[in-house]
Image: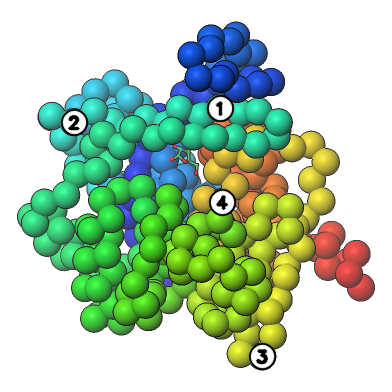
Amino acid sequence: MKKIAVVGSINMDLVVETSKLPEKGETILGDNFFSGPGGKGANQAVAISRLGGDVTFFGCVGEDYFGTELEEYLMLENVESRIRKDPDLSTGVALVNLFENDNNIIVVSGANGYYSEDYFEKLVNELLNYDIILFQLEINEELVFRLIEKLAEYKKQIILNPAPACKIETSLVEKITYLTPNEHECQIVFDSKKPIEKIVKEYPEKLIVTHGDKGAFYSTEDKVINVSPINITDIIDTTGAGDTFSGAFAYSVSIGMPIKKSVEFANTAAGLSIRKKGAQAGMPTLKEVKDRLMVLNKEGD
Ligand code: RIB
């Protein structure tokens, strides 16, 4: 099994369940509140660990209560971590609204945004010990792009989940092994309004696009493949489903699964993750994914 490093954000998620969202200037009463561990980087590391992957998380928190709590959550999930604690910045928080089986999120990055030349050098030295490096864009973008450039020189396998999205230069795309945006992020990354199937076709076996209720799209040299979503009747919380997909995809790459199987595996893991409240709570174990895949394969016979 290859060693995976996740370099990314770690947040405390403050979640409101509500049946509607307020207008500008309006106050409304929400239905319920809970908090829990989140951040796209930490979520993806937890997804990998639940599946039994060999994962280490690299990120930054503040020297505060949330930072201490989040570090403990990672330990409980058996995620190795190398966390920088900043005395001057607060730990990242995400304000999550859950409504109509979907969510919207405002992230205040705090310590996640930290970047210095020394930190860059330190990360490069550490990351050379890993085979697969998984990034998102919820930390300093320049730090991520420079790390990708550097690690590509050492022929590392690089997976980028470009969320939140920004346009990415073609020269950088070439250095990335796999990209896992959702359909909205995909159009921003490639600065294109073309249909997803067309964009996917231009990046065979590199670009995998998740598309909520349509499952996932990727392309081989000759055709676009749509992996259907698994049927989940009890949708509780979709927060972290994209992170489960990217984490599970990195895990399957780490055990040498071919791309077809990896996308099916990740798609199934993401589908299973939405049956519990909280970004990380519903992330499945390896057995749960295998059991569901077995049922799906039997149905397909
Ligand atoms: O992808 C879901 C995550 O986005 C949440 O856990 C929240 O922290 C934000 O980073």
Q: Which amino acid does label 3 sit on?
A: Asp
How many C-alpha atoms fall within 10 Å of the one at disc 3: few (<14), some, or many (≥20)?
A: few
Q: Residue at x 11, y 51 (%)?
A: 116
Residue at disc 1, secondary structure: strand
Mark identifier at residue 222: 3
Q: In this rendering, would 127 be left or right of 99?
A: left
Between the residue at mark 2 and the residue at mark 1, the CA separation in whole angstroms equals 25 Å
- Circle 2 sits on which residue? 89
Q: Nearer the viewer, mark 3 or mark 2?
A: 3
- The mark tally for this picture is 4
Q: At which x and y percent is residue 81? A: 31, 47
Would residue 209 be seen by someone viewing this image from the given angle?
A: yes
Image: 100 above or below 205? above
- Circle 1 sits on which residue? 97
Between the residue at mark 1 and the residue at mark 4, the CA separation in whole angstroms equals 17 Å
Q: Which residue is drawn at 56% across and 56% down?
A: 184
